[in-house]
Structures are given as structure tokens and as C-alpha cells.
């Protein structure tokens, strides 16, 4: 998530759905886990902040909240030598803090979102807002010490661990792997060759990241537990009896968060449909059947480094590979980092079409597999420069 310069956009694009978008933060403490990292204090419980995007009744009389916070983006500012400006926090979001939840439906389906490694909970505010405005409650999970920063409701800030920052900047093995793959990202590899690539990338070069996915999965599973408590009214909130959890939970995520989505689907049956947005196969699901409807959505690179999910999953599985896109374009950087393409970090696809493709694949996929509209055919979403594959479950 590094190496880009924010532009001067004053407001994010309007959400695509019919609902105004409410946003709120809740902080959850997992008392079953403490000292997750060796540098933490012995009695430090795992504290997980979440940003919740939801269909709102009205935005009348309210101003949209600003984007993230300077403290959260400070690490990225330093790691990119000032190229990531903290002033991006002034960008308006079309999200309205603590607005009343919409009353047109009794309950709303739930989707979890996981950010990228070194990123932040609001990195995909555009996508989360599009989903919320379309009738979903979207819970974006913050991962302390591996996010650029998290800020709790009491004002405390946890920034990315300095050793982790250093490793992320200087890991030469990752650079060498990337160099090998970059030159051939549009070439077609056989399934056996793809397995060799994935083994090198994730079991050797990315081993520490592969190991740490378990922490993010535990965070996601714990958040799901807390959502059940919210729905039952055990914790006071506006979400009592508002979460349609009987459908299961959808999950999506960008980059490392995409790998987290797949691993979470494997580990917890409450997660019934998942999307990996331009992420790898960090985790122990590399050779496993996740047994969950799943989509890989991203650049040509993931066709070669993440195809193992497509190969092994026995439920309906999809790949949508977008021409002229780059990794950061699958986040809000597509709109708020207009100069990022000095290093070709976003790609050359027209940004509004790019956003439309990512949002529409999410909407149709979750309509089919979370809402149960099984008549939907994702193959009918037609876009120039999109390589689409599907592998449907054998009856």
C-alpha cells in the first residue's frame, strides 16, 4: 500500500445505491487473546476497532464525515517520505456519522471487509459505501500493529510496529519475487507451474505474512462473534435485531485482506461467500478446498499467484482479471491518489469504469451467494478488457 501521492480531491464519488450511508465505530476487546505480538505488554488484550457502514434513514441536516484520521495515516506519510499526505483526511466521504439506521427493512445482510497489509480500515470507503447504500451492513476490521494505524474511541492510537515497517520496506526476497513475476504477469502458466510460483511466493518469500494471517482470521472470527452479540442486544448499539445473520456473513478484502477472506471462509462456516481483491494465498489454504463460493478479482498477476484457490475450491468459483489495472487501483487510491501513476500504481483503466466493475462484481456475487438469488449469472456482466472464468460446482 505504499509509494503514492494523494491528490486534491475534495469528495469521494457518490455511492451507487438508494440509501444514504451511515458510519460508526465500535471497539471490541477479545479477552481470550493477549500479547498477540512479543513486543506487547504481558496483559495486553487484543483490541479491535471496526468501522461500520450501513444503510441510513436520512442524511438530512448532517455533514458527511471526513476521511480517516491524521494519526492513522501518519505511518504511511513517513514510510513514503511525505508522499502520502495526511491532508487526505479532509476529503468528504458521503458517509454520515451515527445516522439513524434505515427502517425500510427489518434486517440487513452483513459483509466483513479486511484492509491490506500496512493499510487502514477506511482504505476502501468507496466500495464499502457502495455496498452499504445498496442495503448491506459492511464491517471494516482494523488490525492493530499491522495496519498503518488504528485509532480507538478513547483517542488512543496504535501505529504499525516499527520492525514490521522496516521489514516491509527492505525485504529483498519480496522484491526479487516481484521482479520475476512482473515481467510475465500476462503470460499463461499451467496449473502445475502456478503451484510452483505460489509455493515460492508464499511458503518461502512471504512466510512471515503467511503465518500472520491466522491473527487476522482470529480478528475476523471474533468480530463475527461480537456481531451476534450486537444483534441479540447483549451490547448496546443501533444494530440490535438489525443484522440478518441467518443468511451467514459475506467477506471481502484487498490484498492481504483478500487472503484473510479466503482463510476465514475455510476456518469458519458462518462465512458463506468471499472475494479476494487482488490478494495472494497467504495462509494454510494454499492446497485446500475452502468449500465456499469464492471470487478472485484483480490484476493479471493474481491469475498466476492466486489461481490455487480457483483450482482447489469445489464450490462455485470465479476469476475476473482486469486489463490496465494495478494493485492500488483496487482501493480508494484510485480517486484520492491521482499522481500515484507516476509509478504506475493504479493502472490506466478509466477510473469510473474501474470502480463500476469492482462494485458490480461485488453486488452480483453477494446477491447470488449471500442473498440467495441463485438465478443471477455473473458471466453476463460484460466489460471490455476483463478476462472472466467460472468453475461451477459439480452436482
Image (cartoon, helix red, strand yellow):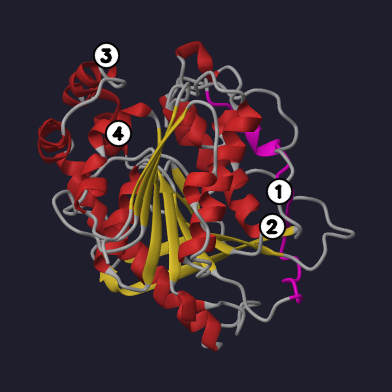
Q: Earlier in the sequence, mark 1 or mark 3?
A: 1
> Toward the viewer: 376 or 265?
376
Is disc 2 in contact with disc 1, using a CB cutoff of under 8 Å? yes
Q: Earlier in the sequence, mark 4 or mark 3?
A: 3
Residue drawn at the location 37% of the way across and 68% of the way down? 271
Observer able to see residue 96: yes
**Label 1: which residue?**
16
Instruction: Residue 339: give x, y in percent of width and height.
Output: 58, 17
Query: In the picture, which quadrant includes the C terminus?
Result: bottom left
Give the Cα separation between the discs numbered 4 and 3.
14 Å
Q: Earlier in the sequence, mark 2 or mark 3?
A: 2
Residue lying at the far front of the rendered structure: 395
**Label 4: which residue?**
303
Q: Residue 337: which quarter of the image?
A: top right
Give the Cα separation between the discs numbered 2 and 1.
7 Å
> Toward the viewer: 369 or 67?
369
Q: Earlier in the sequence, mark 2 or mark 4?
A: 2
> Toward the viewer: 59 or 383?
383
- For disc 2, the neighbor class at 10 Å (few under 14, some 14 to 19, many from 20) is many
Observer able to see residue 142: no
Question: For numbered disc 2, what is the local secondary structure?
Answer: helix
**Label 2: which residue?**
133
Give the Cα separation between the discs numbered 4 and 1.
28 Å
Q: Is residue 27 left or right of residue 53?
A: left
Amino acid at each position: 500500500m505504499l509509494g503514492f501521492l494523494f491528490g486534491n480531491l475534495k469528495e469521494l464519488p457518490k455511492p451507487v445505491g438508494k440509501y444514504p450511508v451511515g458510519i460508526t465505530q465500535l471497539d471490541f476487546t477479545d479477552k481470550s487473546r493477549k500479547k498477540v505480538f512479543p513486543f506487547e505488554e504481558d496483559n495486553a488484550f487484543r483490541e479491535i476497532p471496526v468501522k461500520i457502514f450501513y444503510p441510513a434513514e436520512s442524511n438530512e441536516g448532517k455533514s458527511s464525515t471526513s476521511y480517516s484520521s491524521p494519526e492513522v495515516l501518519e505511518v504511511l506519510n513517513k514510510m513514503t517520505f511525505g508522499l502520502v499526505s495526511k491532508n487526505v483526511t479532509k476529503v468528504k466521504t458521503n458517509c454520515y456519522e451515527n445516522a439513524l439506521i434505515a427502517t425500510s427493512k427489518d434486517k440487513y445482510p452483513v459483509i466483513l471487509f479486511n484492509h491490506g497489509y500496512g493499510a487502514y480500515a477506511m482504505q476502501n470507503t468507496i466500495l464499502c459505501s457502495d455496498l452499504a447504500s445498496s442495503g448491506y451492513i459492511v464491517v471494516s476490521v482494523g488490525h492493530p500493529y499491522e495496519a498503518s494505524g488504528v485509532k480507538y474511541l478513547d483517542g488512543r492510537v496504535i501505529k504499525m510496529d516499527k520492525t514490521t515497517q522496516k521489514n516491509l520496506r527492505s525485504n529483498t526476497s519480496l522484491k526479487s519475487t516481484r521482479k520475476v513475476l512482473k515481467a510475465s504477469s500476462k503470460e499463461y502458466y499451467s496449473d502445475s507451474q502456478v503451484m510452483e510460483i505460489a509455493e515460492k511466493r508464499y511458503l518461502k518469500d512471504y512466510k512471515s505474512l503467511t503465518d500472520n494471517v491466522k491473527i487476522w482470521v482470529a480478528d475476523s472470527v471474533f468480530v463475527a462473534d461480537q456481531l451476534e452479540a450486537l444483534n441479540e442486544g447483549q451490547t448496546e448499539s443501533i444494530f440490535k435485531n438489525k443484522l440478518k445473520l441467518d443468511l451467514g456473513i459475506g467477506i471481502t478484502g484487498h490484498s492481504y485482506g483478500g487472503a484473510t477472506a479466503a482463510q476465514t471462509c475455510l476456518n469458519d462456516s458462518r462465512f458463506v461467500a468471499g472475494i479476494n481483491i487482488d490478494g495472494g494465498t497467504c495462509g494454510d489454504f494454499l492446497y485446500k478446498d475452502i468449500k465456499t463460493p469464492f471470487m478472485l478479482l484483480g490484476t493479471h498477476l493474481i491469475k498466476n499467484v492466486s489461481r490455487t484457490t480457483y483450482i482447489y475450491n469445489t464450490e462455485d468459483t470465479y476469476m475476473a482479471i482486469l486489463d490496465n489495472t494495478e494493485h492500488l487501483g483496487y482501493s480508494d487510491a484510485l480517486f484520492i491518489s491521482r499522481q500515484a501513476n507516476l509509478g504506475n500504481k493504479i493502472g490506466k483503466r478509466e477510473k469510473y469504469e474501474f470502480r463500476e466493475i469492482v462494485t458490480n462484481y461485488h453486488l452480483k456475487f453477494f446477491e447470488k451467494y449471500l442473498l440467495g438469488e441463485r438465478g443471477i449469472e455473473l458471466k453476463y456482466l460484460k466489460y471490455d478488457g476483463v478476462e472472466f472464468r467460472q468453475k461451477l460446482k459439480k452436482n
